[in-house]
């Protein structure tokens, strides 16, 4: 049975923003995991994130000004540096001694990896940027393709919807992907991997239009890890195309899906503008289905998980539960995924 829960996993890296959307000297407000966050980039180029609430009277700091080094609150002009330390309170007169250390604002650990800004939601002393998922083969590169879409649902339903193999023939009917009549049995080998599981590299079963364009029979590997990061790597003899899909909960009822692609195919950049509406349609089909699902979820029904097509969803819930328990008990995370072959018709 599915029991989607609204609590967010802490002490994990979440995707925040594409790096290039945060220019030097600028700031941007965004709610993540229900927390108001102010992202900024100093004139020197360093990204930072602060709680977007002035500690004085709770007005969002994003309503204030940023001079490229410090944020000035719009209400009484208190100033904060990129580490969240209060540096100036304009109303104080000579002789009014205050220890400004007491008036800082919470700051978050952030890191930039492969063209994206990630934020550590939790105890920042535990933040290790090496824990951010890497799209291997594209180290140090920025994505060549990006799509963003807001799903009007809780994180769990967005994750389960995107990883579910059985919905494709029904939700993703399109001439360039699936016709809806080409059902066949699939067997896929899965192994446990860091904070998640991996569908072992295998030859792609159905030659879709998109794969034909890559030439040869491609091989694909797909990995998932907490909190909600999926990396798919497709290779042919000459080419390598990978995509990174991240789902960041904005609130309990809204989740942001970001889809990035990295490739070494020289001509793909020319074709990408034509693929954009197709990829957008694909993400929108998933979005529309979870939107309709909200109609039924209002009645708080219990949901079902069946073998084997819902095994990925089962693992996801087990991974979440184990991560939360390991955190609470302050012990090592033990991956609950057992290596096995999963079969389904799709
Ligand atoms: S509310 Fe921010 S300085 Fe007073
Ligand atoms: Fe889908």
Image: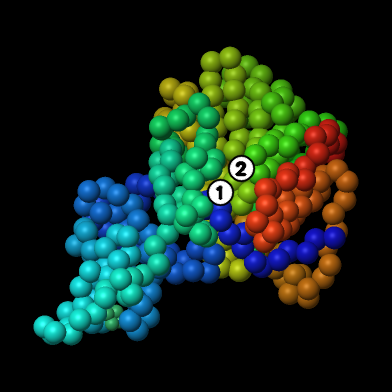
Q: Quick check: is the Cβ at mark 1 less than 8 Å away from ligand 2?
A: no
Considering only vertical position in the picture, is 119 above or below 191?
A: below
Query: Which x, y percent locates residue 8?
Result: 61, 63
In primary-sequence order, the first of circles 2 and 1 is: 2
Residue at 20%, 81% in the rendered image: 97
Residue at 61%, 69% in the rendered image: 252
Quadrant where the image shows the C terminus: top right
Query: Which x, y percent locates residue 260?
Result: 50, 41
**Residue 230 disc label:** 2
Query: Which x, y percent locates residue 255?
Result: 57, 60
> Where's ligand 1: which quadrant?
bottom left
- The answer to whether one can see residue 58 in this image is yes
Residue at 65%, 39% in the rendered image: 194
Query: Which x, y percent locates residue 88?
Result: 20, 73
- The answer to whether one can see residue 312 in this image is no
Image marks 2 and 1: residues in contact by CB distance under 8 Å: yes
**Residue 246 disc label:** 1
């Amino acid at each position: 049975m599915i029991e989607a829960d609204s609590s967010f996993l802490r002490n994990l890296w979440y995707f925040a923003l594409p790096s290039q959307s945060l220019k030097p000297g600028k700031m941007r407000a965004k709610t993540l995991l229900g927390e108001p966050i102010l992202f900024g980039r100093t004139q020197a180029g360093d990204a930072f994130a602060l709680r977007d609430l002035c500690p004085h009277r709770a007005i969002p700091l994003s309503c204030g000004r940023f001079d490229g080094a410090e944020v000035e609150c719009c209400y009484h002009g208190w100033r904060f540096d990129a580490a969240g330390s209060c540096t100036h309170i304009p109303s104080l007169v000579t002789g009014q001694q205050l220890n400004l250390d007491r008036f800082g604002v919470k700051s978050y650990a952030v890191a930039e990896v492969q063209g994206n800004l990630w934020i550590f939601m939790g105890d920042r002393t535990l933040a290790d940027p090496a824990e951010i998922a890497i799209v291997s083969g594209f180290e140090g590169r920025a994505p060549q393709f990006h799509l963003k879409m807001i799903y009007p649902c809780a994180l769990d339903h967005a994750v389960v919807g995107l990883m579910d193999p059985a919905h494709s023939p029904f939700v993703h009917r399109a001439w360039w992907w699936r016709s809806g009549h080409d059902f066949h049995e699939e067997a896929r080998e899965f192994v446990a991997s860091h904070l998640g599981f991996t569908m072992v590299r295998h030859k792609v079963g159905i030659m879709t239009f998109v794969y034909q364009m890559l030439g040869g029979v491609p091989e694909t590997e797909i990995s998932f890890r907490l909190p909600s990061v999926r990396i798919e790597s497709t290779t042919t003899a000459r080419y390598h195309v990978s995509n990174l899909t991240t789902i960041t909960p904005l609130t309990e009822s809204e989740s942001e899906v970001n889809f990035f692609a990295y490739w070494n195919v020289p001509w793909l950049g020319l074709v990408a503008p034509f693929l954009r509406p197709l990829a957008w349609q694909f993400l929108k089909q998933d979005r529309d289905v979870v939107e309709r699902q909200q109609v039924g979820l209002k009645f708080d029904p219990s949901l079902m998980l069946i073998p084997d097509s819902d095994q990925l969803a089962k693992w996801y819930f087990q991974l979440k539960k184990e991560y939360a328990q390991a955190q609470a008990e302050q012990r090592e995370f033990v991956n609950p995924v057992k290596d096995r072959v999963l079969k389904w018709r799709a």
